[in-house]
Structure formats: C-alpha cells, structure tokens
C-alpha cells in the first residue's frame, strides 16, 4: 500500500506531502496520525530549518467524509485534528503550506496552521462544512477570522463557497500566488530564504506572534520585550550585528 504521507528532506528543508490521490488527499484518521508522528520527528531533528506541507495536484479536500458520517458526538470528538494542527502551529521553525488544487475544510484548516501559504493559480480554497450540516471544527472558526477579519471569515464559513487563488490572495489568506509548475520551486526558494535567517530569532518572532495572538496588547508588548531582550544572550545576535558592521554575510550557528 502507498504511504499516506511522504517525507523528504532536501538539504535542511523538510517536505511533508499528503498522498491519498484517489480521495483528493482527504484527511482520514490515519493520515492525520501520520502527520502528527512526522511533526514529532521534525521536532527532534535539529538540522531542519523550515517545513513545507503540500500535496500533488491537491492540497487536501477536507476531512474524510465517509469516515465521519456515522459518528456520534463522542466519536466525532475523538476524530480530533485540533491537537495535531496546534502542534504544527507551535512547531519552533517556519512552516509553509504549498497549496495546489483543493484546500477545503480540514485541508484549509491544516494550511491555516502553517505560518505562510503559497498557492498555485489553480488552487481553490474554502470551508464547505456548512454544506454538510456541520461547521469547521479544526481551527477554521478561530484562525480564519483572526487572519482575515470576521466579516470575510463569516462569509466563507456561512456560505461554504470557494475562493480562487487570486481571491484568497486578495482576502489575505495566501501570501502569494504562482504558476502551478512553479509552486514547489517557489515554496522551496522561500524555505531556503527562511533557512538562512537566524533560527533562534525566527523562533522568537514566532513565539511572540503566537503569544500576542492570545493575549491583550499590554501583555503581548511586555512579552515581546522579554523575548526580544532574551535574544541578546545568543551568539547569533552578536554574529548578525557584527556581520552587518563588517559588511559580510552572517554565519548563524543556532546558538
Ligand atoms: N472525503 C471523502 N472523500 C472525498 C472527499 C472528502 N472530503 N473529497 C473528495 N472525495 C472523494 C470523492 O468521493 C471521490 O471518490 P470516488 O467517488 O471516486 O470513490 C474522489 O474523492 C474524487 O472526488 P470527486 O469525484 O468528487 O471530484 P470532483 O472533481 O468532481 O469534485 C470536490 C472535487 C473537492 C469539489 C468534491 O470532491 C467535494 O466537494 N469534496 C468534498 C469537499 C468537502 O466538503 N470538504 C470538507 C469536508 S468536512 C474535526 C474538525 C474538523 C474536521 C473534522 C474533524 N474534529 C474537531 C473532530 C473537518 C471537516 C471537513 O473537512
């Protein structure tokens, strides 16, 4: 049987590819469990500097509907994606969703748990759960309104329609739109750029943004100062500033 999640490391970039083509990469329990296991592996691998999540032809057409149909409320609760998606959101390195084809329902929710999103021109994004008599339940009602504002998020969630890649760009869901054949190259190029930055500084910025998203402005500003000043204990801060003054490219050590 084909592996549901393909895992490939190119230099210091990890690529995680959902691989259930006959179901348009719909996420069943096994696939999400495998994504979870892979995230745990990435957390242990100190070489990795960025993660790209993608799928061939389609990102993911949502959670697997045939898996869900007969579930009781208790079973539906156990069919949980939230823990894995939150783990992904908090992983201490930058993450990119490279989206082609459908990114629907739980598929879009997976992409929303990434830091950045690149879409190819053929991508279609949406939260169609309302058309199935349910609502988004793996971060869609939480991450999307925070990302694009309530009005646009409510429109997508209540009407269950789909956005083209360029509409998703205008909404602020995706960072950029590229030609289909250039998707992986663009995602990789962005990942490489991220990999050249000081890892501790990137991690700190991510922590500050995540913390701030859950707190008041005053708490967020105070935490930002703490995290910021903490970076002055790192060799990379000295190296970054020294390299600037010496007019050379910094060599970061992640220390
Ligand atoms: N689940 C299962 N199978 C799916 C699927 C899905 N989400 N999407 C596509 N497929 C299957 C189709 O049934 C079809 O299978 P066969 O008939 O060949 O056996 C095959 O993939 C090809 O699909 P189509 O023939 O439909 O292809 P089309 O190009 O005509 O249409 C489509 C593509 C993406 C527009 C259409 O397939 C579609 O509307 N799919 C469903 C999209 C959707 O409604 N997604 C949202 C699912 S609900 C949770 C929280 C959240 C969630 C779960 C749990 N917890 C808190 C516990 C998330 C929920 C969702 O994502």
Image (cartoon, grey):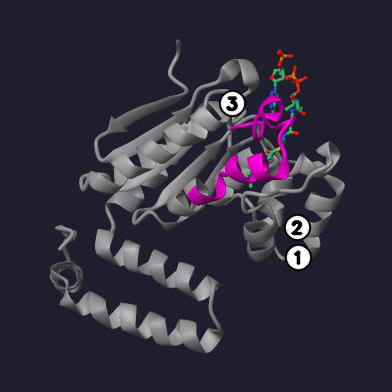
Residue 76: name its quadrant.
Answer: top right
66 in the magenta segment: yes
What's the mark number on residue 150? 1
How far is mark 1 from mark 2, CA to CA?
A: 5 Å
How far is mark 3 from mark 2, CA to CA?
A: 24 Å
Q: Which residue is mark 3?
A: 25
Identify the residue shown where x is 14% and y is 58%. 253
Above or below: residue 156 compared with residue 129: below
**Sooner in the amino-acid sequence: mark 3 or mark 2:** 3
Q: Which residue is mark 2?
A: 153
Circle 3: is it few (<14), some (14-19), or many (20+) Cα within 10 Å?
A: many
Stretch of the chain drawn in magenta: 60-83
Residue 14 is situated, as x and y percent measured from the top left of the image, at 33, 37
Secondary-structure class at tag 2: helix
Residue 152 is situated, as x and y percent measured from the top left of the image, at 78, 59
Residue 146: name its quadrant.
Answer: bottom right
Quadrant (top left, top right, bottom left, bottom right) of the N terminus: top left
Please state which of residues 212 and 83 is positioned toward the viewer in this rendering. 83
Q: Are marks 1 and 2 in contact (CB under 8 Å)?
A: yes
Residue 75: name its quadrant.
Answer: top right
Query: Does residue 106 appear to the left or right of 151 in the view shown?
Result: left
Circle 1: is it few (<14), some (14-19), or many (20+) Cα within 10 Å?
A: some
């Amino acid at each position: 049987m084909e592996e549901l999640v393909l895992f490939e490391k190119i230099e210091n970039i990890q690529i995680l590819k959902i691989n259930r083509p006959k179901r348009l990469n719909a996420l069943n329990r096994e696939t999400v469990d495998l994504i979870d296991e892979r995230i745990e592996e990435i957390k242990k691998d100190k070489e990795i500097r960025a993660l790209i999540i993608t799928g061939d032809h389609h990102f993911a057409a949502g959670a697997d509907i045939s898996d869900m149909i007969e579930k009781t409320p208790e079973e539906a609760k156990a069919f949980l994606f939230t823990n894995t998606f939150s783990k992904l959101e908090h992983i201490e390195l930058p993450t990119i969703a490279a989206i082609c084809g459908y990114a629907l329902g739980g598929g879009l929710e997976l992409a929303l748990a990434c830091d950045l999103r690149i879409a190819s021109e053929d991508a279609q994004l949406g939260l169609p759960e309302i058309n199935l008599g349910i609502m988004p339940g793996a971060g869609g009602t939480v991450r999307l309104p925070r990302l694009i504002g309530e009005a646009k998020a409510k429109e997508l969630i209540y009407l269950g329609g789909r956005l083209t890649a360029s509409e998703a760009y205008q909404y602020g869901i995706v960072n950029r739109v590229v030609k289909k054949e250039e998707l992986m190259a663009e995602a990789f190029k962005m990942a490489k750029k991220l990999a050249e930055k000081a890892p501790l500084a990137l991690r700190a910025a991510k922590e500050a943004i995540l913390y701030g998203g859950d707190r008041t402005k005053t708490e967020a500003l105070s935490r930002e100062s703490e995290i910021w000043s903490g970076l002055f204990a790192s060799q990379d801060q000295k190296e970054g500033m020294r390299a600037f003054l010496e007019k050379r490219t910094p060599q970061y050590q992640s220390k």
